Image (cartoon, rainbow, N blue to C red):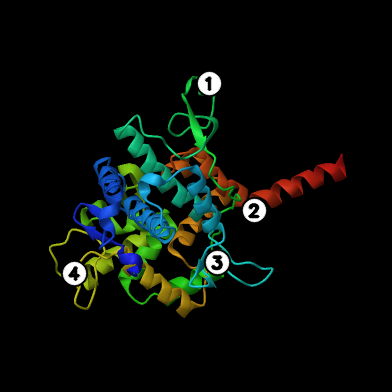
Amino acid sequence: MSDEGGLRVEEHAGGWTLVGPAASGFGLVNEYLGYLVDRRYSPRTVRAYAFDLLAWCRWLMAEDVELAEVDTPVLLRYLAFCRTATYRGRPGGNVYSIGDGRNVGYAAATVNRRLAAVSGLFEFTAMRDPAAVNPVPRGPQRRATARGERGGMLGHLARARPASRLRVRQPRRLPRGLDRGEVAALLDSFRTWRDRSIAGLMLFSGLRSAEVLGLAVADVDIPRGWVRVIGKGDKERRVPVDAEVAGWVQTYLLAERPDTEVTALFVVAKGSHRGRSLSAEGLRAVFRYHRDRAGVPAGHPHALRHTFGTALAEAGVDLAVVQALMGHDHIDSSARYVHLAPAHVRAAFDDARARQRHG
């Protein structure tokens, strides 16, 4: 990460912090990041918030605004900046415009994530000092629901919570999986049992990247074909492992995995970091290389998980089972794959047309 404005983020044993000559003016941000660690937020969430707040603080410095001076108009200016962001005079966002072929601003999901980090910072401030004014404008009350539910018979008993008016409307996108040709090409490109095992656990067991990286050797029961997974929010689930994938993992353990005291299942195979746990950056590099090599630009790790979810839906697997296998908090997340399953749509369409024809 560049050190623009004398401010950057660094990782340490307890999480992430802002450092640099300008960091003294943002001590509140570091206290908030420490609070997230104390609340047992996932390391990936804390990292994301750290970089989002770094962008926010750099913008404040460029605007010559102190953190204590932030009010609602300042937040609205930051929102406008995120929607039309440029970098050194060039378009620097992550939304590709078909109209003019330029990148303009950041995607709605990115903007909302950044605003959520800023909003959380001011909620933390208000929690410490009830007299402090929260500059984040609040919208109408939003009904909170029990974990794993959206409404329901007792939904009216849940406590309402205010929604932020700063949120940008996000288009509802269906997850994109890979077709059979893309899956075959990507799997054929892997030349090590480690990389093939990683892809297999995502593709045939639906594991997330962080879940794969968090696996310990003891978590995989090869003879019985099960894997113990720690998902989001430290929630544990047991997922069946395809027999062929279990064989890949066993071959990796016997023939490839270097001798190391590290308990992680997947470790670095060569180089100066040989024997250390495979990092998220390392996993991204593996997939970046292989999707280029295989000619499958959509071959990102999460696309393999989406492919698994789609296959479950097309096979008619019960939604509750899909939810359990994929570790979804909400059944709505699992239902997206039913909408994505073209086989179901086609079957229903053909059945309806047959009824129309024959009365």
**Closer to the camera: disc 4 or disc 2?**
4
Q: Are marks 2 and 3 in contact (CB under 8 Å)?
A: no
Give the CA separation, mark 1 to mark 3.
Answer: 45 Å
User: Of helix, strand and loop, which one carries label 1?
Assistant: helix
Q: Is residue 55 above or below residue 313?
A: below
- As drawn, is 13 to the left or to the right of 136? left
Q: Is residue 301 above or below residue 345?
A: below
Give the CA separation, mark 4 to mark 3.
Answer: 34 Å
Query: Of callouts 4 and 1, which one flags the residue occurring earlier in the amino acid sequence?
Result: 1
Residue 343, disc: 2
Residue 210 lies in quadrant: bottom left
Residue bearing mark 4: 275
Compare residues 236 and 12 and report the one nearer the observer.
12
**Closer to the camera: disc 4 or disc 1?**
1
Query: Of callouts 2 and 3, which one flags the residue occurring earlier in the amino acid sequence?
Result: 3
Residue bearing mark 3: 180
Q: Residue at x 33, y 38 (%)?
A: 125
Residue 50, position as x, y percentages in the image: 34, 54
Give the CA separation, mark 2 to mark 1.
Answer: 37 Å
Compare residues 153 and 65 and report the one nearer the observer.
65
Residue 221 in sight: no
Query: Of callouts 4 and 2, which one flags the residue occurring earlier in the amino acid sequence?
Result: 4
Residue 295, position as x, y percentages in the image: 52, 77
Query: Of callouts 1 and 3, which one flags the residue occurring earlier in the amino acid sequence?
Result: 1
Residue bearing mark 1: 156
